[in-house]
């Protein structure tokens, strides 16, 4: 287990200072706030500074809100295993005054598909997943045809399917539940924007707010999503996290395939049911993926790439109607598309919880718990998240995750 800073020096619990200030109150900031406030070993004060309490444009509410165990890095598998267990019991964990939240969890697997060039990668990933006790079934083409008769399989070499512990849920409900529970446990939410970070030598001393004034802090947590690099820059630090636009398209199908899993085509395109509709998306090639903060939707991507790809894989999708679409932003870690967690080596009371790229929502329970443990206990106690530490950024040593969606 790695060690890291506790909260000292403490500041008095008043509006001018908090033991812990969390910049950003999306799902990550709110999960950290909840786990910290719920930790019996922590008796400090916590403020979450959130610039847009409507959450209209944050990553959380624009997410595809799915969870899988089918990663290739053991730490990501363990994070999602805890995440799914937490979601199953979310009503118990996050009930407030006897009212249990419902995040609409649907338990259904991801189906990763490979053509012959991708076969060895799929096999290597499956080996790691089985070693981590993830209930993932290997399916050769005849098995795929038997289980998913609506799939086109003649160009496929194999697939893997998650029997349990994968699925999807409602992102906004999860965020609201974390936030409400955190507030019920005494966390203060401030509707304001962090515009300045004041250092005293190697430590963070305070943050400045857009509406005026400063708050002293014992620990600052950067949970600013796609804007995380701006918070780091205010502290004089570089964080390789950039906003990258991703689209979600919603469509209707005349004769929908029944019980469709979350299908990941060998091209990387995905599709899953969402109520009576379907949602889908795909990542652009790296050379067509600029830093970007607008919300314009590229409908040509759907017409020219996504729809033909999905109709090839599932012929029933030849007869579909686009219902709506939206754009959101990944907090894209340009080194390895994985989370960056824990303290900066030179600034021990600044903790990162950033760079989740396309898998931060499902990681919120384990990351919330882990960052809370660092603050309350000075070390990870339940799950060692140190492979995701900032030091790998300094070493330019990527944590390879082959299953990025
Ligand atoms: C299209 C799309 C699909 C996705 N699909 C999935 C998926 O299927 N599964 C999955 O696990 N993940 C998915 N993700 C990723 C996931 O949504 C994110 O990783 C996760 O929501 C990150 O949460 P966050 O709290 O870090 O960021 P955010 O939700 O963006 O929250 C950050 C908050 O910080 C606030 N903020 C920023 N700067 C400041 C400041 N200076 N002062 C105060 N407040 C500030 C913002 O207003 C915002 O509310 C997807 C993302 C997108 C865009």
Image: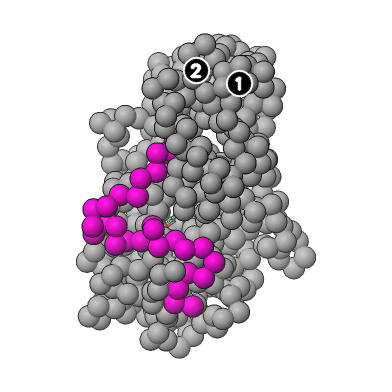
* Residue receiving disc 1: 144
Q: Is residue 356 visible?
A: yes
**Against 10, is 204 above or below?**
above
Quarter of the image for residue 200 reads bottom left
Is disc 2 surrounded by few (<14), some (14 to 19) or many (20+) residues within 10 Å? many
In the foreground, 50 or 158 = 158
Quarter of the image for residue 227 reads bottom left
Residues in magenta, as a range: 377-405
Q: Is residue 387 left or right of residue 145?
A: left
Looking at the picture, how far across and down is residue 207, in whole percent?
34, 73
> Marks 1 and 2: in contact by CB < 8 Å?
yes
Q: Residue at x 41, y 36 (%)?
A: 246
Determine which of the numbered discs, if any, sits on residue 295 in the image: none
Looking at the picture, how far across and down is residue 199, in whole percent?
26, 76
Determine which of the numbered discs, if any, sits on residue 156 in the image: 2
Is disc 1 surrounded by few (<14), some (14 to 19) or many (20+) residues within 10 Å? many
**Against 27, is 153 above or below?**
above
SS under mark 1: helix
Looking at the picture, how far across and down is residue 44, in whole percent?
51, 82
Magenta highlight: main SS: loop
SS under mark 2: loop
**Against 124, is 251 above or below?**
above
Tell me which label, 2 or 1, sits earlier in the chain.
1
- Residue 390 lies within the magenta run: yes
């Amino acid at each position: 287990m790695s060690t890291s800073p506790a909260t000292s020096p403490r500041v008095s619990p008043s509006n001018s200072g908090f033991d812990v200030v969390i910049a950003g109150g999306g799902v990550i900031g709110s999960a950290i706030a909840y786990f910290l406030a719920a930790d019996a070993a922590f008796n400090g004060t916590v403020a979450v500074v959130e610039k847009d309490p409507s959450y209209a444009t944050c990553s959380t509410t624009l997410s595809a809100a799915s969870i899988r165990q089918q990663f290739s890095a053991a730490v990501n598998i363990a994070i999602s295993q805890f995440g799914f267990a937490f979601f199953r019991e979310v009503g118990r964990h996050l009930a407030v005054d006897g009212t249990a939240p419902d995040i609409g969890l649907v338990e259904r697997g991801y189906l990763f598909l490979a053509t012959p060039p991708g076969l060895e990668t799929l096999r290597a990933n499956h080996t790691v997943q089985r070693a981590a006790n993830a209930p993932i079934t290997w399916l050769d083409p005849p098995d795929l045809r038997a289980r998913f008769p609506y799939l086109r399989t003649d160009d496929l070499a194999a697939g893997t399917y998650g029997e349990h512990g994968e699925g999807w849920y409602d992102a906004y409900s999860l965020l609201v539940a974390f936030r409400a529970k955190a507030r019920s446990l005494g966390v203060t939410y401030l509707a304001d924007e962090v515009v300045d970070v004041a250092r005293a030598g190697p430590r963070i001393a305070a943050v400045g707010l857009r509406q005026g004034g400063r708050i002293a802090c014992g620990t600052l947590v950067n949970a600013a999503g796609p804007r995380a690099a701006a918070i780091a820059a205010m502290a004089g630090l570089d964080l390789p996290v950039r906003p990258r636009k991703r689209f979600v398209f919603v469509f209707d199908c005349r004769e929908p395939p029944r019980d469709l899993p979350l299908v990941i085509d060998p091209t990387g395109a995905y599709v899953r049911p969402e109520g009576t509709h379907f949602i889908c998306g795909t990542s652009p090639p790296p050379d067509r993926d600029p830093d970007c903060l607008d919300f314009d939707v590229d409908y040509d991507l759907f017409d020219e790439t996504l729809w033909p790809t999905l109709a090839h894989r599932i012929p029933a999708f030849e007869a579909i109607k686009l219902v709506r679409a939206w754009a959101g932003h990944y907090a894209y870690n340009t080194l390895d598309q994985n989370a960056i967690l824990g303290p900066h080596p030179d600034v021990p009371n600044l903790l990162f919880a950033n760079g989740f790229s396309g898998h931060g929502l499902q990681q919120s329970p384990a990351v919330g718990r882990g960052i809370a443990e660092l603050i309350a206990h000075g070390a990870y106690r339940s799950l060692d998240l140190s492979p995701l530490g900032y030091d790998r950024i300094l070493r330019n040593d990527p944590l390879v995750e082959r299953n990025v969606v």
